[in-house]
Image (cartoon, rainbow, N blue to C red):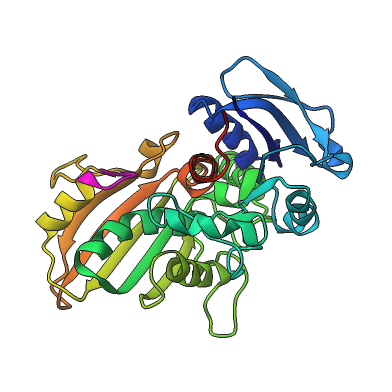
Amino acid sequence: MGYRVVVVGATGNVGREVLNVLAEREFPIDEIAAVASSRSTGVEIDFGDSGKLLKCKNIEHFDWAGWDIALFAAGSAVAKEYAPKCAAAGCVVIDNSSLYRMDPDVPLVVPEVNPDAIDGYKARNIIANPNCSTAQLVVVLKPLHDAAKIKRVVVSTYQSVSGAGKAGMDELFEQSRAIFVGDQVNSTVFTKQIAFNVIPHIDVFLDDGSTKEEWKMVVETKKILDPKIKLNATCVRVPVFVGHSEAVNIEFEREISAEEAQDILREAPGVMLIDKREDEGYITPIECVGDGATYVSRVREDPTVENGLTLWCVSDNLRKGAALNAVQIAELLGRRHLKKG
């Protein structure tokens, strides 16, 4: 016996990926509904590779009663209006937007890191999915924190344009094409040209000079992993279509060698260690696309601080950073709270 599942924002990048992941992982489903805005009503989308086509329903008229789980992939504005209605109807919301992440009554969950946090979902019937850059980071930090206790993290991100949605991917493509053929380059999604460039600016600037994306990484890591961890982030948009990369410097309370860290990461859930000190002995974004793992490479000791390590991690941001993590939350919810049959 399976669940009645709703995918909200089904026509977007993340929504389509949620449908793919649900099908791939054979999530137990009795009925599935694809829901989107009125302009997408009637649009047919694939339910993964199942061969089944789903016709999009209008969210404005959707009846949430009787559904078990709703995976929201439609942004904060949609979540603000419809997630409470969905939750009030008895359907558990798993939300990919930033709206509820720091709400004390809403668990922020990465199943490999803090599965017990999901038990708090009943307060509002809502579970939050973390920011894409945070999700891959905490999967890597968790086993190392358990082993040697992390004091401080400095991370620089190299985030793909798919983090800005289909419009961001289209802008990279159109700007690249324009440069090659000599046309004018226009920037509407990003603040500066993204093609053949990098932009140290994701989301709005805050009063302290950081951006909201950087703030998210700090506060979400503290909520998911440990409020005592100090973290400094610099988030950069790069001309890559899919896949976020991070250069991570970690300072620990206790001594930990690069070899010990490699042994720990090799066995860690959700992590794939590819770390050979030779040409091609590391992973780049293009190699992680379509995969659910967070890949770690270039683990080495940092001689500038006591008990320090540096590493490189890469993950498909549409997968572990969004769709896969949301489905893993649904699986965890099913095992612990919504058991069928």
| Residue 294: x %, y % from top left | 35, 46
Q: Could you tell me which residue is drawn at 27 percent across and 65 percent down?
A: 145
Foreground of the two, 21 or 1: 1
Q: Give the magenta range.
A: 267-272
Q: Could you tell me which residue is drawn at 87 percent across and 44 percent down?
A: 60
Vertical position of residue 316 compared to residue 158: above or below: above
Foreground of the two, 126 or 72: 126
Q: Residue furthest top?
A: 51
Q: Could you tell me which residue is drawn at 84 percent across and 33 percent down?
A: 41
Question: Which image quarter is the C terminus in?
Answer: top right
Vertical position of residue 110 compared to residue 255: above or below: above
| Residue 271: x %, y % from top left | 30, 45
Q: Residue furthest bottom?
A: 208
Residue 270: say if magenta: yes
Can the viewer see residue 200? yes
Vertical position of residue 150 compared to residue 207: above or below: above
